[in-house]
Amino acid sequence: MGELASILPLMFALVLGVVCHEWAHGYVAYRLGDATAYSEGRLTLNPIPHIDPFGTILMPALLAMTGAPVFGYAKPVPVVFQNLRNPLRDMVWVAAAGPAMNLALALGATIMLSIVKNSGLTGPTMVSVW
């Protein structure tokens, strides 16, 4: 049970990260003129349409159980670059949206962890990340 309790928060963070990453690609593509992700039901933060059974669940769980560095992936959001208003310029923005979302999530998590660490709420049951 202890191993499962340590893997679940990691899996939650991984699913949150890959879903937000793919949503960002789809959202920017939608704003720039490509409604493909929207029409296929992929412009959502619901993890179900984004989950790849192997890349989002099985592989990260196996990596976590073996103590290896954990990574994963989701199904890529479909983008038809010809539908973008200015395909050459806009495909750069669509491609950059996912990594930008990852950086924003990392910054948000860092700020929240700093607040918790400096609030005095940490105790013997909380795991130190520093």
Image (cartoon, rainbow, N blue to C red):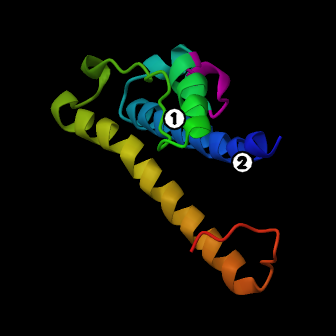
Number of marks drawn: 2
Magenta span includes 43: no
Which stretch is magenta?
A: 45-53
Residue at x 16%, y 32% (from the top left corner): 88
- Residue 61 image-quadrant placement: top right
In x, y percent, where is residue 58?
59, 23
Q: Which residue is mark 2?
A: 6
- The answer to whether one can see residue 53 in this image is yes
Amino acid at the residue labelled 2: Ser
In the depicted view, which residue is nearer to us: 55 or 80?
55
Magenta span includes 49: yes
Q: Which residue is mark 1?
A: 23
Q: Secondary structure at mark 2?
A: helix
Q: Secondary structure at mark 1?
A: helix
The mark that comes first in sequence, 2 or 1, is 2
64 up-or-down from 6: above or below: above
In the depicted view, which residue is nearer to us: 90 or 13?
13
Residue at x 79%, y 46% (from the top left corner): 2
Question: In the shown orientation, is residue 120 left or right of residue 102?
Answer: right
- The answer to whether one can see residue 43 in this image is no
Residue at x 61%, y 20% (from the top left corner): 49
- Residue 93 image-quadrant placement: top left
42 up-or-down from 129: above or below: above
In x, y percent, where is residue 60?
55, 32
Q: Are marks 2 and 1 in contact (CB under 8 Å)?
A: no
Q: Residue furthest top?
A: 40
Amino acid at the residue labelled 1: Trp
